[in-house]
Amino acid sequence: MELRALHYFVTVAEELHFGRAAQRLRIVQPAVSQQITRLERELGVRLLDRTSRRVRLTPAGERVLAAARETLAAAARVRVVAGEPAAALRVGVATCVTERLDRALARLRDSERPAAPRLVDLPVPARLDAVRDGELDLALVRGAVTSTALTVVRAWSEPLHAVLSGGHPAAGKPAVSLHDLDPYGLRLPDRDADPPLHDAIVAALPVAPLRPPAGDMLNVLFEVSQDPEGWTLMPAEQLAGSRSERVLQVPLDPPMTVDGHVVTSLATPESCVASYVAAFAD
């Protein structure tokens, strides 16, 4: 039994879709199907029920999934114990630490090719330049990135939330429409620090921003907290760990999302890109 087959099976089980699993693994879909079929033949059980509309785990598949994850983690530990050092992995991120980042770092440390992540806080333009120049191994970016000099792969999607002052009229609502928020109360950071996210937020707005940029995100949140009509938009995960009583986040109605991307150099092996994407995926 090959570890590769177990890795493919775990990916399909997480996605419940062969096409998306193939994208995460950066291989063609028939190769994934062949590995799963071979694994089922070797185990003598059907792991997945698949039709033209859906894929789901069989009872045997659910049992094998837990064991497969344990096996892959054990294989990674064996390599470390045997003397294979964890490879240093330089990751370009923003200043905030999210549950997704914590979970991904744990996955990278315990993966088939164990990594020792080192976080580097840089603005997005400098982050992308550092990946291109080989100073970072990968970067995380929210919003669309278009570059022929980098490999950009969507890894996750998260909601955009309205961030309001504690005294805002909509602060107690379960959700709020952008059309119900005062356009003049909107605060946005300078585009220079994070162009992809800035552009994604502006694209979601029903009207163009009326106020000039308020500096960095810390200044934006301060201005929002001081204005009873103040608000901004942020990815939900960015404020998830905040304990501030001056600002709070409220889901949008209708919901809006922003995609998160893993960005690597063109020279990064496809297998490595796939493991990075898998680590940060939902």
Image (spheres, helix red, strand yellow):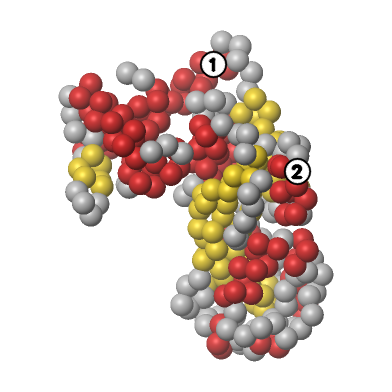
267 versus 120 height, above or below: above
Q: Position of residue 262 (x, y in %)?
A: 59, 47
- Viewer-proximal residue, 251 or 207? 207
SS class of the residue under badge 1?
helix
Badge 1 amino acid: Arg
Q: Residue at x 23, y 21 (%)?
A: 42
Residue shown at 56%/31% (left/top)? 269
Circles 2 and 1 in contact, beta carbons < 8 Å: no
Q: Nearer the viewer, mark 2 or mark 1?
A: 2
Mark 2 — residue?
Answer: 130
- Res 5 → quadrant: top left
Residue at horizontal 78%, vertical 75%? 213
Identify the element where label 2 is drawn.
helix
Question: Callout 2, which amino acid?
Answer: Ala
Q: Which residue is more in the foreground, 246 or 78? A: 78
In the figure, is residue 185 to the left or right of 59? right
Identity of the residue furthest to the top in this view: 82
Instruction: Name the residue furthest front.
Output: 148
> Visible in this render: residue 166?
no
Q: How many marks?
A: 2
In the rendered structure, the answer to whether residue 184 lies left or right of residue 16 reads right
Instruction: Report, in whole angstroms, how far the alpha carbon at label 2 lies from the one at label 1.
Output: 30 Å
The image position of residue 211, as x and y in percent, is 76, 83
Position of 150 relative to 252 (above/below):
above
Q: Position of residue 18 (x, y in %)?
A: 32, 44
Q: Residues within 10 Å of mark 1 (few under 14, many from 20)?
A: some
- Please give the name of the residue rendered at 34% of the width and 40% of the height, measured from the top-left corner: 29
Compared to residue 160, the image places residue 165 above or below, namely below
Residue 203 seen in render: yes
Q: Name above or below for residue 37 compared with residue 132.
A: above
The residue that disc 1 covers is 79
